[in-house]
Image: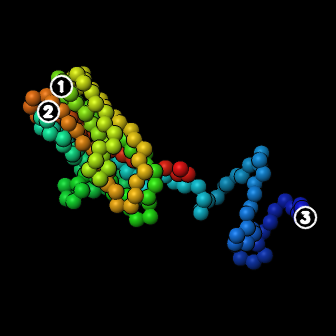
């Protein structure tokens, strides 16, 4: 093996420079620093798909009925994978083609003056609750926000559900109600 000492390498013609050949391993030794002043492609990641959806109005939740939260406003949706309507698997994120992997998911809601003996919010995958944050005798304006890391396959869908036993229908406030998530890199 030989060592080449140079301060700069430019392509002989054109604007593309290739280092190594297909199948080669390029090693950056410990302690070395790579500085990127341009655009990177083909490595690293950008945590997409990612989405955040909110409610445009307070939602009435019937007593003793697990209810899907209406997220009808998209704050952002990088892959157009959030369904903000009631059709199909309504108010849900569906994993797009080629995007299976681990996702960080978070939900939030705020009770609107409840005096509930029991309340929970859940993040569900394909209709099945995966994480439930259960509040017994929560405060009048309690904010509840479960966070979950899910291993999702293409076509899996994620929704948020609320349940309470307060004797009559109760509202959740739109201002603190959201569902969001993004694909994790390198796990």
| Residue 137 visible at all | yes
User: Which mark is first along the chain, 3 or 1?
Assistant: 3
Residue placed under numbered mark 2 in the picture = 170
Which type of secondary structure does the marked residue at label 2 adopt?
Answer: strand
Of residues 58 and 103, the one nearer the viewer is 103
Location of residue 73 in the rendering, given as x and y in whole percent from the top left corner: 27, 49
Mark 1–mark 3 Cα distance, whole angstroms, equals: 75 Å
Location of residue 7 in the rendering, given as x and y in whole percent from the top left corner: 84, 59
User: Which mark is first along the chain, 3 or 2?
Assistant: 3
Report the residue at 39% width, 44% height from top: 105
User: Which mark is first along the chain, 2 or 1?
Assistant: 1
Residue placed under numbered mark 1 in the picture = 116
Location of residue 54 in the rendering, given as x and y in whole percent from the top left corner: 28, 45
| 8 in relation to 173, above or below | below
Dot 2 crowding, Cα within 10 Å, few <14, some 14–19, many 20+: many
Label of residue 2 in the image: 3
Asked if residue 39 lies left or right of residue 138, the reply is right
For the N terminus, which image quadrant?
bottom right
């Amino acid at each position: 093996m030989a060592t080449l000492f140079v301060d700069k390498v430019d392509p002989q013609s054109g604007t593309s420079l290739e280092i190594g050949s297909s199948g080669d391993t390029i090693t950056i030794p410990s302690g070395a620093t790579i500085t990127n002043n341009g655009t990177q492609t083909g490595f690293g990641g950008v945590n997409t798909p990612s989405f955040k959806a909110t409610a445009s109005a307070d939602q009435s939740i019937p007593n003793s009925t697990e209810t899907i939260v209406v997220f009808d406003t998209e704050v952002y949706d990088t892959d157009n994978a959030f369904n903000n309507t009631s059709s199909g698997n309504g108010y849900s994120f569906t994993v797009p083609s080629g995007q299976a992997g681990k996702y960080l998911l978070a939900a939030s809601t705020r009770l609107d003056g409840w005096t509930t003996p029991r309340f929970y919010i859940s993040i569900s995958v394909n209709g099945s609750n995966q994480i439930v944050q259960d509040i017994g005798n929560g405060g009048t304006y309690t904010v509840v926000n479960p966070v979950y890391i899910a291993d999702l396959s293409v076509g899996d869908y994620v929704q948020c559900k609320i349940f309470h036993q307060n004797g009559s229908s109760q509202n959740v406030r739109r201002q603190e109600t959201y569902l969001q998530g993004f694909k994790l890199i390198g796990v």
